[in-house]
Image: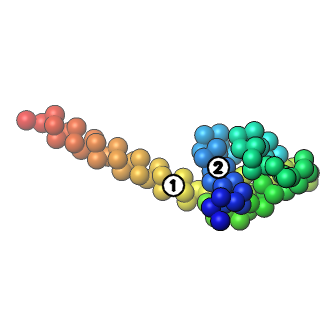
């Protein structure tokens, strides 16, 4: 349900990643547990990052990429399609305002 950690965690992570950019799973797990300690209750230090990774992998708006070298941590980021859609909205808003400003500046 909406109150479950499985539902809330990826959405919180998405807001966090929008501000920070991509993060490795252990760093994201630490930040999430500090931001929402109630969600991390019931998980030990080893289980929590695994739960975070599973929740991120199950959320279509986030992308989990494996590390380049063996032993590297997986990295979580917001899907490019989501970022592209948001940047398109910003660009279209800017274009509209430029046209408005241009029309206002002409007699």
Picture disc at residue 5: none
Tell me if mark 1 has few (under 14), some (14-19) or many (20+) residues whose alpha carbon lies within 10 angstroms of its own: few
- Position of the N terminus by quadrant: bottom right
Q: Which residue is drawn at the image coordinates 41% and 52% (left, top)?
A: 89
Q: Is residue 85 left or right of residue 22?
A: left
Q: Which residue is drawn at the image coordinates 72% and 57% (left, top)?
A: 5
Q: Which residue is drawn at the image coordinates 78% and 54% (left, top)?
A: 52
Residue 101 versus residue 91 in the image, above or below? above
Q: Position of residue 19 (x, y in %)?
A: 60, 40
Q: Nearer the viewer, residue 84 or 50?
A: 50
Q: Circle 2 sits on which residue?
A: 12
Q: CA distance from mark 1 to mark 2?
A: 20 Å
Q: Position of residue 67 (x, y in %)?
A: 82, 53
* Label 1 with label 2: CB-CB less than 8 Å: no
Q: Is residue 19 left or right of residue 50?
A: left
Labels 1, 2: front one:
2
How many numbered marks have been drawn onto this rendered protein structure? 2
Label whose residue precedes the other's in the sequence (1 or 2): 2
Q: Position of residue 9 (x, y in %)?
A: 69, 54
Task: Give the residue at the far left of this rendering.
Answer: 107
Q: Circle 1 sits on which residue?
A: 84
Q: Secondary structure at mark 2?
A: helix
């Amino acid at each position: 349900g909406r109150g479950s950690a499985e539902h809330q965690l990826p959405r919180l992570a998405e807001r966090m990643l929008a501000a920070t950019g991509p993060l490795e799973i252990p760093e994201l797990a630490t930040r999430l547990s500090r931001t929402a300690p109630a969600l991390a209750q019931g998980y030990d230090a080893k289980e929590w990052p695994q739960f975070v990774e599973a929740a991120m992998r199950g959320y279509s708006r986030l992308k989990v990429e494996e590390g380049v070298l063996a032993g590297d941590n997986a990295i979580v980021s917001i899907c490019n399609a989501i970022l592209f859609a948001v940047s398109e909205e910003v660009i279209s808003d800017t274009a509209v305002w430029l046209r408005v400003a241009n029309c206002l500046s002409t007699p």
